[in-house]
Image: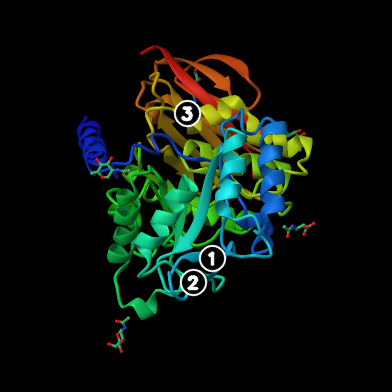
Amino acid sequence: MLFIIAFAVLISFNSIYSLDNGLGKTPQMGWNSWNHFGCSINETIIHATADALIATGLAQAGYTYVNVDDCWASSRDQTTNYIIPDPIGFPSGMASLADYVHSRGLLFGLYSDAGIETCAGRPGSYGYEDIDAQIYAQWKVDYLKYDNCYAGPTNKTIKERYERMRDALNRTGRPIFYSACEWGEMLPAIWFRAIANSWRTTSDISDHWISMLLNIDINDLFANFAAPHGFNDPDMLEVGNGGMTSTEYRTHMSLWSIAKAPLLIGCDVRQLSQETLEILTNSEVIAVNQDSLGIQGQKIRIDLEHDTEVWAGPLADGSKAVLAFNRAHIINQTISVSFPDLGWKSTSRVKVRDLWLHQDLGEFQGNYTAFNIESHGAQLLKMTLITL
Ligand SMILES: *[C@@H]1O[C@H](CO)[C@@H](O)[C@H](O)[C@H]1NC(C)=O
Ligand SMILES: *[C@@H]1O[C@H](CO)[C@@H](O)[C@H](O)[C@H]1NC(C)=O
Ligand SMILES: *[C@@H]1O[C@H](CO)[C@@H](O)[C@H](O)[C@H]1NC(C)=O
Ligand SMILES: *[C@@H]1O[C@H](CO)[C@@H](O)[C@H](O)[C@H]1NC(C)=O
Ligand SMILES: *[C@@H]1O[C@H](CO)[C@@H](O)[C@H](O)[C@H]1NC(C)=O
């Protein structure tokens, strides 16, 4: 009971001090160029990506932001200080690119940095926050990812540097989603709610099982600080990039969904396998992520002996999203979910649904046991109380 009261206070505290731009009621969904393309991007690729998001049904599934990461800018005009897009990769300019993305019914995002240079050595926004924010608004940018490279020479704190861009974006009068990327250095989850719509809790993800797990494990420590308008960000999806098995990618997607992490696709959507598309577009899995309650699911039981975990979080309709997760290498395992762990009773009757398979598994009393969960696999479930 005490726990429930403390949690309620935290939630209301969280909503009061949110960044007030009206955005990010649920975690952002879209695509970002970095994980697959790195610096090798240009307007042709972004056009084709916007087209592919529509053609594949990804946009329909909710992936609406088209975000260009580092390397779109080349320099700063010596007299006006305006940022200049790379003339080779983006000859039509960013306003034209934003128009193209908008014409497809999608939203357009850009990237900059709270230091003197971006991570790839392009001009940073420190000292030019207003001039950059104004031009983003003029170009009709909807989203800004703001990185943290080359900040040393500014002699300014993270707080001051990220607030400067928050205020500059606000002064444009255009609601622009503000995605902070300071890599979790100063435990941003604890105090970034008033600054940004999402904040990275970790260093960069890479397309490997260990990296994905490390990021979601760290992100889990800050679960109680997530709420509508401000979410923890364990970094973008690697689903479809080839470094994990399909089972692992399905687990990656399950973990990001239950943890209310931003769902930003990081693969080349112009050439998707059917399997990748199915992992990214499962409507019941996405619904967990986009649930209006916006409470981050977290680990509720860790079995160190068998290397299995149960994660859970509440949903707006009173049911729970539950993940039965086999972290172990090689072996299939049986994972039991005890209803008292979910706040119910050992006599409670509960309806269980497999969200990946869109299948009702039946009614259970006291506990539910998932059999034969593959190594690195997980079952994502929805559990609804029938009788306490
Ligand atoms: C700017 O900030 C004020 C005060 O927090 C807020 O009411 C307003 O909606 C913000 N405007 C934009 C465009 O973010
Ligand atoms: C973008 O890159 C692709 C492949 O690397 C190339 O075919 C295309 O011409 C490039 N477009 C521009 C505008 O540079
Ligand atoms: C940062 O601090 C150093 C040493 O105190 C000083 O030399 C430098 O001019 C400062 N830089 C800025 C941008 O204020
Ligand atoms: C699970 O519930 C069943 C009855 O529904 C009971 O027989 C079994 O002992 C329970 N297992 C655990 C691990 O609680
Ligand atoms: C492991 O589980 C998967 C499905 O979850 C099943 O296809 C496979 O046969 C199982 N392997 C063993 C050795 O039981």
Looking at the image, residue 180 lies above or below residue 121: above
Residue 241 coordinates in the image, percent (x, y) = 71, 51
Q: Residue at x 60, y 48 (%)?
A: 97
For the residues labelled 2 and 3, the Cα–Cα distance comes to 51 Å
**Callout 2 crowding tier (Cα within 10 Å): few <14, some 14–19, many ≥20:** few
Looking at the image, residue 27 lies above or below residue 69: above
Say which residue label 2 marks: 77
Residue 67 coordinates in the image, percent (x, y) = 56, 49
Circles 1 and 2: CB atoms closer than 8 Å: yes
User: Mark 3 or 1 closer to N-term?
Assistant: 1
Viewer-proximal residue among 175 and 259:
175
User: Mark 2 or 3 closer to N-term?
Assistant: 2
User: Mark 1 or 2 closer to N-term?
Assistant: 2
Check the picture and name the quadrant holding the C terminus: top left
The part of the image, by quadrant, that contains residue 191 is bottom left
Q: Give the foreground label among 3 and 1.
A: 1
**What amino acid does circle 3 point to?**
Ala
Check the picture and name the quadrant holding the N terminus: top left
What number is the disc on residue 84? 1
Classify residue 282 as left or right of residue 147. right
**What color scheme is it?**
rainbow
Residue 84 coordinates in the image, percent (x, y) = 54, 65
Classify residue 260 as left or right of residue 274. left
What number is the disc on residue 321? 3
For the residues labelled 3 and 1, the Cα–Cα distance comes to 46 Å
